[in-house]
Amino acid sequence: MLQVVHSDLYSLKADRQYSSSSSGIFSRGSIFFKDKDGSLVSAASLQSGFVVTINPKILKNLEEVYEKINAITPIDREKFFAKALKPSSSYEEVASRVESSLGEKINSLNITGLKAYKERWRFYPGGSTAAHIVGMMGYQGDDFAGRYGLERQFESILKRSTDSYGNFFAQIFSNIKAAAAKDLEGEADIVTTIEPTIQTSLEKTLVSINNKLSSEATGGIILDPKTGEIYAMEMYPTFDPNHPELLKNISVLSNPLVENVYEMGSIIKSLTVAAGIDAGVITATSTYYDSGFLIVNNKKISNFDGKERGIVSMQDVLSQSLNVGAAHVAKLLGNKRLTDYFYAFGLNEKTGIDLPNEGRNLMDNLKSPRDIEHFTASFGQGIAMTPISATRALATIANGGVMVSPHVVKNINYKIGVSDQTEITSGKRVIKRETAEELTRMMVHSVDKVLAGGIYKLQNYSIAVKTGTAQMAKEGGGGYYEDKFLHSFVGYFPAYNPKFFVFLYTIDPKGFRFSSETLTGPFMELAKYLINYYELPPDR
């Protein structure tokens, strides 16, 4: 049974012809994407080739040997001679990851002291595709292991036992120390929820947004609001895990969608209005007098343009994104009740997503006894959250008022033949279904009648959206920048039975003031693409 499970490992050991080397046979579990038809697509696997080695103790005619190797596969001359001129060393690697046919040509030279051995290494077929999800491996001291993304999160089950290259029985008789045995039950492959075609489409959209706006960074998440399965997630700039040597800034390896927190701005008004309707203090048609600003705790709160609106409805609060209106709802709710609702939406806790280093939301302003902190929180300022946390909270509205658990792992396939599938459970109810349906109707109205004058309305599909523009806090505190903003955008469709929930954001875009100007077009293009790709039936 052991030989069947690890047949590839033993085949490679045979290829090494029982030769002992300075490192073990590299083996590791695979990571897969899953397309919409259920087919697995490799995201992280193993690739085979040759490592070219020399024995400086017995290698002769160094110049001639170098020329012969270099004629087959280019190698650095300086490094070759630096290693070849080590008289006390019996093993030096002068080239690695050499194509198999070239490695065989090197062996056919039959030069004493020169040998090419088969090797394997981690390979990411999609390059930068979903790099922040899949992650990559790296060294920490002498330990080579998963350091980012799923590679890190599931290191304990992706890693494999390694032996020295020697045949087991040969090692016993030659006193070569064998590697310790490992419990095979913990070894597994990972199948993700990432749909590669959707992932690629999202990534192209992010690059386009970022380049057009000269933004600092741009990110996005696409998930199923009913199950929490993430179809796509990425941040740009990104990286290619096959070529870490090309990285100019190591900070790009972290995943801001999970690790960083931001003040999200007006997309949070959806939660405030939902809380107000759910608590019974307002309805969609409730009105108030909007003077364009208000003073609370000696602080001024203004609408984005400072203009007076007169008597307006709660529909206008969402459609026109009125800060004064959100503060009005917060006042009717009271500080404690607003805080309780925000906590119920999960903003005071981590989502528990199956990725490493999830950040902690900054909600301390909600502990303040003053009204001002709660009023600003009602329109998404003064509180900060991870993009995945904001996505989970707002997807609750799309899911009829029930919270789901966002996740990127669909199932774990253990080598012993057992598959552990991520359980989709019914989360806690946060708001009544009727509340969620009313919020959805209000957000659809914003698309059909208000957003860019209704030009984005789809005749046969209902789309629910909310835009957000937040001032960015100065590093180290001390207020907000006057000219730096974070633009955010959330939407779901078909609105009353949604298959997709999309979250987009871009940091410090240039040339445009509001997210309605920067993210509406890209969102709608994604929406139309997903509707066609999945052949979703019309809902109106």
Image: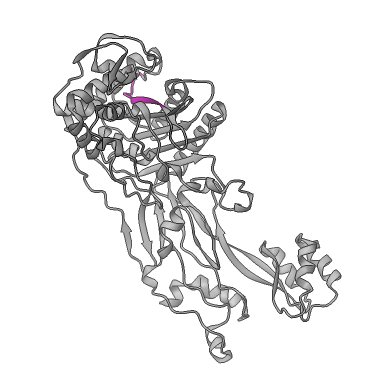
Q: Position of residue 296 (x, y in %)?
A: 27, 21
Specify start and end residues of the magenta stretch as a single range.
459-470
- 3, above or below 371, in the image: below
Q: Is residue 39 left or right of residue 98?
A: left
Evaluate whether residue 224 shows in this view.
Answer: no
Q: Position of residue 471 (x, y in %)?
A: 42, 27
User: Which part of the image, by quadrant, shows the C terminus?
Assistant: top left
Q: Position of residue 87 (x, y in %)?
A: 77, 79
Q: Is residue 24 left or right of residue 384?
A: right
The residue lying toward the viewer, choosing from 304 and 474, is 474
Identified at 30% across, 9% down, the residue is 309
User: Which part of the image, by quadrant, shows the N terminus?
Assistant: bottom left
The residue lying toward the viewer, choosing from 442 and 51, is 442
Asked if the stretch drawn in magenta spans residue 464, the answer is yes
Q: Position of residue 173 (x, y in %)?
A: 56, 92
Extreme-top residue of the structure: 310
- 276, above or below 426, in the image: above
